[in-house]
Amino acid sequence: MLIPALGAKMPASLEDALIRSDVRDFSKFIKIWAEAGASIGAACTGTFILAETGLLDGQRATTSWWLSSLFRQRYPLVALDDSLMLVNSSSFTTAGAALAHLDLALGVVRKVSPSLASLCGRYLLIEPRSSQAVFIIPDHVAHTDPLVERFEQWARANIAQGFSLTDAARAVGASERTLGRRLKSILGKSPLAYVQDLRVERAVHLLQTTNESVERIAEQVGYSDGATLRGLLRNKLGKGVRELRKRYM
Protein backbone atom coordinates (compact mmCIF):
# COMPACT_ATOMS: atom_id res chain seq x y z
CA MET A 1 0.00 0.00 0.00
CA LEU A 2 1.41 3.37 -1.05
CA ILE A 3 0.50 6.50 0.88
CA PRO A 4 -0.09 9.54 -1.36
CA ALA A 5 1.71 12.78 -0.58
CA LEU A 6 -0.14 15.82 0.74
CA GLY A 7 -0.40 18.98 -1.37
CA ALA A 8 1.24 21.03 1.40
CA LYS A 9 4.99 21.29 0.81
CA MET A 10 6.20 23.71 3.50
CA PRO A 11 6.24 23.21 7.31
CA ALA A 12 3.38 25.54 8.29
CA SER A 13 0.90 24.32 5.68
CA LEU A 14 1.97 20.71 6.24
CA GLU A 15 1.26 20.90 9.97
CA ASP A 16 -2.20 22.29 9.18
CA ALA A 17 -2.83 19.43 6.73
CA LEU A 18 -1.83 16.76 9.23
CA ILE A 19 -4.64 17.72 11.61
CA ARG A 20 -7.36 17.52 8.97
CA SER A 21 -10.08 14.99 9.72
CA ASP A 22 -9.58 13.09 6.46
CA VAL A 23 -5.86 12.65 7.19
CA ARG A 24 -6.56 11.45 10.74
CA ASP A 25 -9.20 9.00 9.47
CA PHE A 26 -6.77 7.71 6.85
CA SER A 27 -4.15 7.14 9.55
CA LYS A 28 -6.54 4.75 11.31
CA PHE A 29 -6.84 2.64 8.16
CA ILE A 30 -3.06 2.58 7.76
CA LYS A 31 -2.76 1.02 11.22
CA ILE A 32 -5.38 -1.59 10.34
CA TRP A 33 -3.61 -2.50 7.10
CA ALA A 34 -0.25 -2.67 8.86
CA GLU A 35 -1.64 -5.00 11.51
CA ALA A 36 -2.98 -7.19 8.72
CA GLY A 37 0.56 -7.55 7.36
CA ALA A 38 0.50 -5.09 4.49
CA SER A 39 3.75 -3.61 3.18
CA ILE A 40 3.46 0.17 3.27
CA GLY A 41 5.38 2.80 1.33
CA ALA A 42 5.44 6.60 1.44
CA ALA A 43 7.47 9.43 -0.09
CA CYS A 44 7.80 13.16 0.49
CA THR A 45 4.99 14.47 2.74
CA GLY A 46 3.37 11.04 2.72
CA THR A 47 6.08 9.99 5.17
CA PHE A 48 4.57 12.39 7.70
CA ILE A 49 1.20 10.67 7.43
CA LEU A 50 2.89 7.33 8.09
CA ALA A 51 4.88 8.75 11.01
CA GLU A 52 1.70 10.22 12.53
CA THR A 53 0.45 6.67 13.09
CA GLY A 54 3.40 5.85 15.35
CA LEU A 55 4.24 2.84 13.17
CA LEU A 56 7.66 4.29 12.33
CA ASP A 57 8.71 4.70 15.97
CA GLY A 58 11.97 2.84 16.46
CA GLN A 59 12.29 2.36 12.68
CA ARG A 60 14.68 3.92 10.15
CA ALA A 61 13.15 6.31 7.63
CA THR A 62 13.83 9.19 5.25
CA THR A 63 11.77 12.13 4.01
CA SER A 64 12.06 15.31 1.92
CA TRP A 65 15.34 16.91 2.95
CA TRP A 66 13.92 20.42 3.47
CA LEU A 67 11.29 19.03 5.86
CA SER A 68 13.77 17.01 7.92
CA SER A 69 13.89 19.53 10.78
CA LEU A 70 10.10 19.43 11.23
CA PHE A 71 10.11 15.63 10.95
CA ARG A 72 12.70 15.27 13.73
CA GLN A 73 10.78 17.61 16.01
CA ARG A 74 7.45 15.84 15.49
CA TYR A 75 8.75 12.27 15.49
CA PRO A 76 11.84 12.04 17.75
CA LEU A 77 11.45 8.26 18.07
CA VAL A 78 12.01 7.70 14.33
CA ALA A 79 15.62 7.16 13.21
CA LEU A 80 15.58 9.68 10.35
CA ASP A 81 18.36 9.72 7.74
CA ASP A 82 17.46 12.45 5.28
CA SER A 83 20.68 11.88 3.31
CA LEU A 84 19.19 8.70 1.86
CA MET A 85 16.85 8.60 -1.11
CA LEU A 86 15.20 5.34 -0.06
CA VAL A 87 15.01 3.46 3.26
CA ASN A 88 13.59 -0.02 3.80
CA SER A 89 12.67 -0.80 7.40
CA SER A 90 10.57 -3.72 8.61
CA SER A 91 7.33 -3.56 6.60
CA PHE A 92 7.84 0.07 5.58
CA THR A 93 9.58 1.82 2.69
CA THR A 94 10.11 5.58 2.78
CA ALA A 95 11.56 7.86 0.12
CA GLY A 96 12.60 11.49 -0.29
CA ALA A 97 11.06 14.36 -2.21
CA ALA A 98 8.97 14.71 -5.37
CA LEU A 99 10.58 12.50 -8.03
CA ALA A 100 11.69 10.11 -5.27
CA HIS A 101 8.24 8.60 -5.83
CA LEU A 102 9.93 6.82 -8.74
CA ASP A 103 12.60 5.49 -6.37
CA LEU A 104 9.84 4.41 -4.00
CA ALA A 105 7.99 2.53 -6.74
CA LEU A 106 11.15 0.77 -7.90
CA GLY A 107 12.05 0.02 -4.28
CA VAL A 108 8.74 -1.74 -3.75
CA VAL A 109 9.20 -3.76 -6.95
CA ARG A 110 12.80 -4.56 -5.99
CA LYS A 111 11.64 -6.29 -2.80
CA VAL A 112 9.85 -8.86 -4.97
CA SER A 113 12.09 -8.95 -8.03
CA PRO A 114 15.42 -7.08 -8.27
CA SER A 115 15.72 -8.02 -11.95
CA LEU A 116 12.29 -6.58 -12.77
CA ALA A 117 13.10 -3.37 -10.88
CA SER A 118 16.34 -3.06 -12.86
CA LEU A 119 14.49 -3.59 -16.14
CA CYS A 120 11.84 -1.00 -15.25
CA GLY A 121 14.56 1.48 -14.33
CA ARG A 122 16.19 1.00 -17.74
CA TYR A 123 12.92 1.58 -19.58
CA LEU A 124 12.15 4.67 -17.48
CA LEU A 125 15.72 6.03 -17.76
CA ILE A 126 16.13 6.09 -13.99
CA GLU A 127 19.70 5.73 -12.79
CA PRO A 128 20.39 4.23 -9.34
CA ARG A 129 20.64 7.09 -6.83
CA SER A 130 20.89 6.14 -3.19
CA SER A 131 21.51 9.61 -1.80
CA GLN A 132 19.67 12.92 -1.48
CA ALA A 133 22.81 14.56 -0.13
CA VAL A 134 23.87 16.02 -3.47
CA PHE A 135 20.57 17.96 -3.66
CA ILE A 136 20.45 19.29 -0.09
CA ILE A 137 20.85 23.04 0.48
CA PRO A 138 22.41 23.15 3.98
CA ASP A 139 21.50 26.72 4.93
CA HIS A 140 17.82 26.18 4.02
CA VAL A 141 17.48 23.63 6.82
CA ALA A 142 19.69 25.62 9.22
CA HIS A 143 17.53 28.73 8.96
CA THR A 144 14.66 27.02 10.76
CA ASP A 145 16.39 27.81 14.09
CA PRO A 146 18.14 31.11 15.11
CA LEU A 147 21.02 29.44 16.99
CA VAL A 148 21.69 26.98 14.18
CA GLU A 149 21.49 29.83 11.66
CA ARG A 150 24.14 31.80 13.61
CA PHE A 151 26.34 28.71 13.66
CA GLU A 152 25.89 28.24 9.92
CA GLN A 153 26.91 31.85 9.25
CA TRP A 154 29.98 31.52 11.50
CA ALA A 155 30.96 28.21 9.88
CA ARG A 156 30.75 29.65 6.36
CA ALA A 157 32.87 32.64 7.36
CA ASN A 158 35.53 30.33 8.84
CA ILE A 159 35.24 27.43 6.40
CA ALA A 160 38.94 27.51 5.45
CA GLN A 161 40.02 27.20 9.09
CA GLY A 162 40.34 24.11 11.23
CA PHE A 163 37.10 23.48 13.11
CA SER A 164 36.95 24.25 16.84
CA LEU A 165 33.74 23.54 18.76
CA THR A 166 34.91 25.86 21.54
CA ASP A 167 35.36 28.76 19.12
CA ALA A 168 32.03 28.01 17.44
CA ALA A 169 30.09 27.93 20.70
CA ARG A 170 31.69 31.19 21.85
CA ALA A 171 30.87 32.86 18.53
CA VAL A 172 27.16 31.96 18.63
CA GLY A 173 26.74 32.68 22.35
CA ALA A 174 25.96 29.16 23.57
CA SER A 175 27.67 26.40 25.48
CA GLU A 176 29.27 23.57 23.51
CA ARG A 177 26.69 21.17 24.94
CA THR A 178 23.74 23.39 23.97
CA LEU A 179 25.08 23.91 20.47
CA GLY A 180 25.61 20.19 20.00
CA ARG A 181 22.14 19.30 21.26
CA ARG A 182 20.45 21.95 19.12
CA LEU A 183 22.12 20.80 15.93
CA LYS A 184 21.30 17.19 16.73
CA SER A 185 17.66 18.13 17.28
CA ILE A 186 17.29 20.32 14.19
CA LEU A 187 19.72 18.77 11.71
CA GLY A 188 20.23 15.30 13.13
CA LYS A 189 24.02 15.69 13.11
CA SER A 190 26.95 17.07 15.11
CA PRO A 191 28.45 20.54 14.55
CA LEU A 192 31.49 18.97 12.87
CA ALA A 193 29.31 16.87 10.55
CA TYR A 194 27.38 19.98 9.51
CA VAL A 195 30.62 21.86 8.84
CA GLN A 196 31.62 18.95 6.62
CA ASP A 197 28.35 19.40 4.69
CA LEU A 198 29.16 23.08 4.15
CA ARG A 199 32.67 22.19 3.02
CA VAL A 200 31.28 19.67 0.54
CA GLU A 201 28.79 22.22 -0.79
CA ARG A 202 31.54 24.80 -1.26
CA ALA A 203 33.96 22.30 -2.80
CA VAL A 204 31.38 21.13 -5.35
CA HIS A 205 30.66 24.74 -6.29
CA LEU A 206 34.38 25.40 -6.85
CA LEU A 207 34.85 22.18 -8.79
CA GLN A 208 32.03 23.09 -11.15
CA THR A 209 32.78 26.80 -11.60
CA THR A 210 36.60 27.07 -11.54
CA ASN A 211 39.64 25.34 -12.99
CA GLU A 212 41.47 25.25 -9.68
CA SER A 213 43.16 22.01 -8.62
CA VAL A 214 41.63 19.69 -6.07
CA GLU A 215 44.56 20.48 -3.77
CA ARG A 216 43.84 24.21 -3.94
CA ILE A 217 40.12 23.72 -3.42
CA ALA A 218 40.84 21.50 -0.43
CA GLU A 219 42.80 24.36 1.16
CA GLN A 220 39.90 26.75 0.63
CA VAL A 221 37.45 24.48 2.45
CA GLY A 222 39.65 23.64 5.41
CA TYR A 223 41.54 20.49 4.42
CA SER A 224 45.29 20.03 4.23
CA ASP A 225 45.29 17.80 1.17
CA GLY A 226 43.20 16.80 -1.82
CA ALA A 227 43.03 13.14 -0.82
CA THR A 228 40.97 14.00 2.26
CA LEU A 229 38.56 16.06 0.17
CA ARG A 230 38.25 13.34 -2.45
CA GLY A 231 37.39 10.81 0.24
CA LEU A 232 34.80 13.13 1.79
CA LEU A 233 33.11 13.77 -1.56
CA ARG A 234 32.95 10.07 -2.30
CA ASN A 235 31.61 9.29 1.17
CA LYS A 236 29.01 12.08 1.26
CA LEU A 237 27.83 12.15 -2.35
CA GLY A 238 28.84 8.79 -3.75
CA LYS A 239 30.62 10.60 -6.58
CA GLY A 240 34.22 11.27 -7.49
CA VAL A 241 35.82 14.50 -8.65
CA ARG A 242 35.52 13.54 -12.33
CA GLU A 243 31.77 13.06 -11.99
CA LEU A 244 31.31 16.32 -10.12
CA ARG A 245 33.62 18.53 -12.11
CA LYS A 246 31.86 20.38 -14.94
CA ARG A 247 33.62 23.31 -16.55
CA TYR A 248 31.33 26.15 -17.58
CA MET A 249 32.44 28.21 -20.55
Image: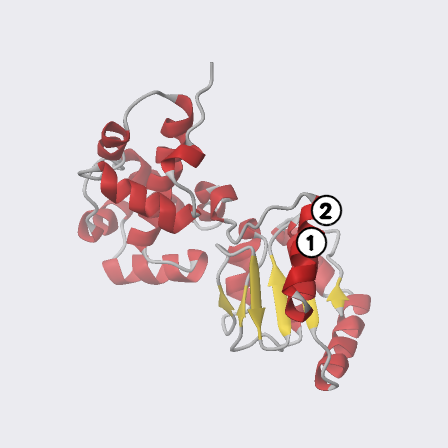
Q: Secondary structure at mark 2?
A: helix
At 43% from the left edge and 34% from the top edge, which residue is drawn?
A: 244
- Give the amino acid type for the residue marked by disc 1 in the picture: Leu
Residue 119 has which mark? 1
Q: Position of residue 113 (x, y in %)?
A: 67, 67
Which residue is more in the foreground, 83 or 111? Answer: 111
- The answer to whether 201 appears left or right of 23 in the picture is left
- The answer to whether 84 appears left or right of 4 in the picture is left
Total labels: the figure holds 2
Q: Secondary structure at mark 1?
A: helix
Which residue is more in the foreground, 77 or 11? Answer: 77
Q: Position of residue 170 (x, y in %)?
A: 21, 49
**Quadrant in which the N terminus is drawn:** bottom right
Within-10-Å neighbours for mark 1: few <14, some 14–19, many 20+: few
Q: In whole angstroms, how far apart are the C-alphas of marks 2 and 1?
A: 6 Å
Which residue is more in the foreground, 115 or 222? Answer: 115
Q: Which residue is mark 2?
A: 123
Q: Is residue 98 visible?
A: no
- Give the amino acid type for the residue marked by disc 2 in the picture: Tyr
Q: Position of residue 96 (x, y in %)?
A: 60, 54
Task: Give the vertical position of 129 relative to 22 (above or below).
Answer: above
Q: Position of residue 6 (x, y in %)?
A: 74, 56
Q: Is residue 164 visible?
A: yes
Residue 172 has which mark? none
Which residue is more in the foreground, 4 or 106? Answer: 106
Task: Give the vertical position of 160 relative to 115 (above or below).
Answer: above
Occupied quadrant, residue 202: top left
